[in-house]
């Protein structure tokens, strides 16, 4: 079940890169430009997982996970959101993370599902991280009859940590800035991509995985994305406010990070309490649980495998 660990990661990099090169990759045209996608299916997949990544991320960052899922006979479809990664950027300054409305992200996800997932299988589920978790929830709320079997949400963006500003103030500032026509400008305190040293990072305790991520963005500068615009922030507040009052009649499993400073872990527990089919487990990690130290990462993946097996059809079809 587990094929990767941080101590042997350097030895596995060749195999991980080989698998990445073997994956089917391409671009889908959309109303928001080209959407970069990655698709891999083993000969007899147990099921298909649609990986919906977080802000500033790219499918290529998940190469280790894609390799490990393939060794577990799991098919994968993943992609880069409009405005980041290897998809088309939405502003003249490609560093600004911008969106007018999260419907743009939902539309891109729908396009991926319609084009790459539904023609191939009806035995599929979501795995989503951070902003991707909010996008999946938005998708499910607008598609209550989705054929997806379930959604595994890893540190989902249900409430943003706006410290040192209170959320109500940050929300009002973002809305006012958009009304004044500053929607495509960096929000307060945001700037172009800047590398952070490991000791100063808010993402993971795993130095090896963090350094690989940093090296990837140094080597492929087109992946770099800076902070968010007032427009993105206003749209994010609008969506998270809606999700905080939403109920889902759908199997959901949440992995929450106790040391998360990017999103608010308390919102995960509140979401689970509102939704009878939602289970939650908390881990002593930072925001990127899928890139954490091995004991945490393996526990999170165990949660995913158990959830996936409980909601998808197994190999005998029962």
Image (tube, rainbow, N blue to C red):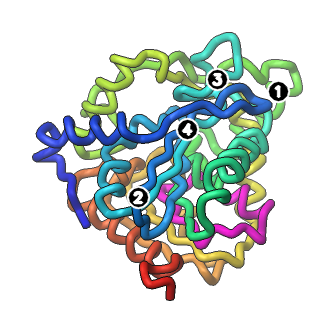
In the picture, measured across the screen, residue 285 lies left or right of residue 178, that is: left
Q: What residue is at 50 percent from the left and 35 percent from the top?
A: 25
Q: Would you name the residue on which mark 3 appears?
A: 88
Q: What residue is at 60 percent from the left and 76 percent from the top?
A: 251
As helix, strand or loop, the secondary structure at mark 3 comes to loop
As helix, strand or loop, the secondary structure at mark 1 comes to helix
Q: Which of the marked residues, 2 or 1, is nearer the chain's N terminus?
A: 1
Q: Would you name the residue on which mark 1 appears?
A: 178
In the picture, measured across the screen, residue 293 lies left or right of residue 180, that is: left
Per the rendered image, the range of residues in magenta is 137-158
Report which quarter residue 177 is drawn in: top right
Q: Kindly report the distance in space between the C-alpha atoms of the residues bearing marks 2 and 1.
A: 32 Å
| Disc assigned to residue 52 | none
Front residue of this view, candidates 267 and 305 = 305
**Local crowd at mark 2 within 10 Å, few (<14), some, or many (≥20)?**
many
**Foreground tag (1 vs 4):** 4
Q: Which of the marked residues, 2 or 4, is nearer the chain's N terminus?
A: 4
Report which quarter residue 71 is drawn in: bottom left
Magenta stretch contains residue 143: yes
Q: Would you name the residue on which mark 2 appears?
A: 257
Q: Kindly report the distance in space between the C-alpha atoms of the residues bearing marks 3 and 2.
A: 31 Å
As helix, strand or loop, the secondary structure at mark 2 comes to strand
């Amino acid at each position: 079940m587990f094929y990767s660990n941080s101590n042997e990661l350097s030895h596995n990099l060749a195999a991980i890169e080989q698998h990445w090169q073997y994956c089917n990759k391409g671009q889908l045209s959309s109303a928001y430009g080209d959407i970069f996608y990655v698709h891999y299916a083993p000969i007899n997949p147990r099921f298909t997982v649609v990986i919906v990544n977080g802000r500033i991320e790219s499918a290529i960052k998940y190469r280790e996970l894609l390799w490990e899922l393939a060794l577990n006979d799991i098919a994968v479809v993943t992609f880069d959101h409009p405005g980041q990664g290897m998809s088309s950027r939405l502003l003249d300054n490609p560093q600004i993370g911008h969106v007018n409305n999260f419907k743009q992200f939902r539309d891109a996800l729908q396009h991926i599902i319609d084009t790459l997932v539904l023609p191939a299988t009806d035995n599929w589920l979501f795995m989503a991280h951070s902003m991707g978790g909010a996008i999946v929830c938005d998708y499910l709320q607008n598609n209550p009859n989705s054929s997806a079997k379930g959604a595994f949400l890893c540190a989902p963006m249900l409430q943003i940590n706006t410290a040192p500003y209170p959320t109500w103030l940050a929300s009002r500032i973002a809305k006012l800035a958009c009304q004044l026509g500053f929607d495509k400008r960096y929000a307060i305190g945001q700037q172009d991509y800047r590398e952070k040293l490991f000791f100063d990072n808010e993402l993971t305790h795993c130095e090896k995985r963090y350094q690989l991520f940093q090296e990837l963005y140094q080597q492929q500068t087109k992946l770099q994305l800076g902070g968010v615009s007032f427009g993105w922030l206003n749209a994010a507040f609008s969506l998270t406010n809606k999700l905080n009052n939403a109920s889902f009649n759908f199997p959901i499993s949440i992995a929450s990070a106790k040391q998360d400073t990017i999103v608010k872990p308390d919102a995960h527990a509140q979401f689970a309490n509102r939704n009878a089919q939602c289970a939650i487990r908390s881990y002593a990690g930072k925001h990127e649980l899928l890139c954490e130290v091995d004991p945490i990462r393996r526990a999170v993946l165990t949660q995913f495998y158990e959830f996936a097996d409980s909601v998808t059809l197994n190999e005998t079809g029962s």
